[in-house]
Amino acid sequence: MKLGSLIDKDFILVGKEFASMNEAVTALIELFAKRRKLPVPSQRIMEIHQERANLGGLVLPTGVAIPHGRIDGFHDLLIGVWIPPKPLETPDGVVKALFFSLTSKTGTALYLPVLSALSALSTNTEQFGRLLSATTRSEAQEVLDRTTLKQEVTVEDIMNPSPITCFKESTLAELADTFKRHKVSYVPIVNEQQQLIGEVTIKDLISRGIPDYVRRLGNARFLKTLEPFEALLREEDRILVKEIMRKPTRSITRNASIIETATIITGKQVRHIPVTDSGKLVGLVSETDILDKVIRG
Amino acid sequence: MTHLIIGSAFFVVLFILISLEVANKTVLSLLGAALFIGMGIIEQHLAFEEVDWNVVFLLIGMMVIVGVTKRSGLYQYIAIKSAKAVGGDPVKILILFSLLTAVLSAFLDNVTTVLILTPVMILIAVELGLSPTPFVISSALASNIGGTATLIGDPPNIMIGSAAQLGFTDFLVNLGPLVLILLVVHCALILLFFQKKMKVSMERRARVMDFDEKAALTDTTVLIKSLSVLGLVILGFLTHGITKIEPATIALGGAALLMLLVGGEEVEEFFHEVEWGTIFFFIGLFIMVGGLVELGVIEMMANAYLGWTAGDITLTSQSIIWLSGVLSSLLDNIPYVATMIPLVEHMSNELGGAAIEPVWWSLALGSCLGGNGTLIGASANVVSCGISSRSGYKISFLEFTKYGVIVMCITLAIASLYVRFRYL
């Protein structure tokens, strides 16, 4: 499906100047209202949009703004486009192109694919450049027609394509620094060929100091100190990651569905899944990715 | 005749597969039971009658009661308290822990006991800067000795008690004194094995003295209720002679009472304390052995045995102690005892009920004490060494066995003397 087919030519604004994203959105809502009977007044749509906008995160690093409003009893997907003559500075980032979507509260099946197509478009330098330099609606429409929509969002669309990794010969001290410096709680372990050979979490690091027998005690309230835990602190420069890493218990391919990902995350009580392509680590997908890019996409 | 050969061959193969743990033993025993019924060796209604429900319900009841009791943290409390009471002296701790394991094994059951106590022992050994191995091995061996003393201490005793109509007091009176002697010998042996490895610094001792054992008691309400019920249940076992209430009924009643007192939302959780795998293992075994009885295999074996001993009760019981000891150390002692019970019952038909009692004690002693012979000889050994290995202190088959086989031989020798002079 073409992105262009979903966007009415009349809802594209080219060359107009607005002082803020809100002004542009207001203008687009008026365009919608002129052509379509909307179930709620424009003012209400603006409020709904504003509530979402207050949460932030509507401007992608590539310069695409994706404000949206979800309203009750509206079973369609309207998308309005604004290409500012020059990039607009906003508190959320620089806006080079704005796509405002109006959809039902439950969202339509196409909404997520549209977001992912927009994100893909904004990283395609050539096409995105052509869109930004469009001077007429038709020119913009042409670019959108060339952008195809993947019907299904896959892991590849939401994963982190360059996760922080570690080697099995690293020491626990280095591992602890990695966790702290990059603010991550999970690190895939790879070999020189970037093949996934293990995984380790902050919890695994701590577990090294709390052996199995301590966990079997029932409770540890009577312990204020514990020799294995002190040994961990003492010997973090000598213990290697391979001693605490686990075999990769799960992995997923990049064209796996979001549902499969979410099922593994909830069913196995894990927070991260490494993404592999014939054994090689190509990304990492986490519960936060599902929240940020799907539930609050 | 074909049935007889095929049935016996099946049984032997399954017995070996179970002992080698080629596949899950519960699954194997149920599969065997289904085959026996399916092949028409034993009819279904007869097969179900072969299941000794007294054993099954006694096990279920005790598993629930002990499962609830262990939530109170009492056993950790006792272990830490005793380590502190001897000032963190490792030799005394080693002895105390063995005795504690033996006593608890007699009144709970030995697998649960080592499940609860092994982690505390490893903890204390590691804090003292010692290898946990001597502690784990000594107490696993002690649990099998202690479990021998009572009806509920070790699964073979539960089965024998039920089949031979021997009660809790019968076991305590007949085997208790011997077990006390064996424990003293066991302590002397472990001192001989491990004493020179027990050297610790004052600094390490101070760490153990710093444990706050009172904090281990998580829930005093559960503690009081579960101890009261456990006390009532043991009282029930002891007064069986007067009340005539069977152990299974006492244990199930106690479990129900305890769940009523402690439960609420958690009642479902208490049932998770029951090791259903073990329960169904027993059920499958009873059916298979029932099939062997139907086939007449057991009768033939019993007659052959009596033919060999010429009906001499001394030779019969003495040989059963050693045969059971050696076989139980190499094979799983539960299917072994399940097979031996109908065999001894046949002998009692020949020799007379009263005369056979020493043979029952010999079977109990041989199969319980034989469990010490190797690492795989008893579930308690497997469980405690498993915990140790998972904590990073691996105990190999040979390491365990080199101590276990000595303890087994000496305790079996004392046991056969005891039986010889007390009963024959």
Image (cartoon, rainbow, N blue to C red):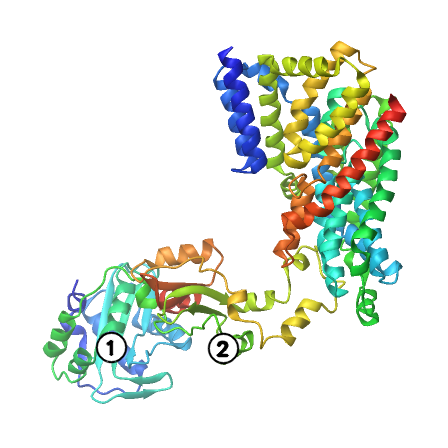
Let me know if marks 2 and 1 both belong to one chain: yes
Q: Position of residue B334 (x, y in %)?
A: 66, 31
Name the residue tied to disc 1: A122
In the picture, which quadrant includes the N terminus of chain A? bottom left
B3 sits left or right of B393 in the view = left
Q: Position of residue B55 (x, y in %)?
A: 70, 27
In the picture, which quadrant includes the C terminus of chain A? bottom left
Towards the viewer: B217 or B396: B396
Marks 2, 1: nearer the viewer: 2
Q: Residues within 10 Å of mark 2 (few under 14, many from 20)?
A: some
Dot 2 or dot 1: first in sequence order is 1
Secondary structure category for the residue under label 1: helix
Towards the viewer: A111 or B41: B41
At x 45% / y 57%, what residue is drawn?
Answer: A249
Secondary structure category for the residue under label 2: helix
Q: Quadrant of residue A5?
A: bottom left
Q: Chain of mark 1?
A: A
How far apart are labels 2 and 1 at the CA level?
A: 31 Å
Towards the viewer: B242 or B290: B290
Name the residue tied to disc 2: A178
Q: Is residue A206 above or below residue A20?
A: above
**Is there CB contact under 8 Å for labels 2 and 1?**
no
Residue B161 visible in the current orientation: no
State the mark number for residue B343. Answer: none
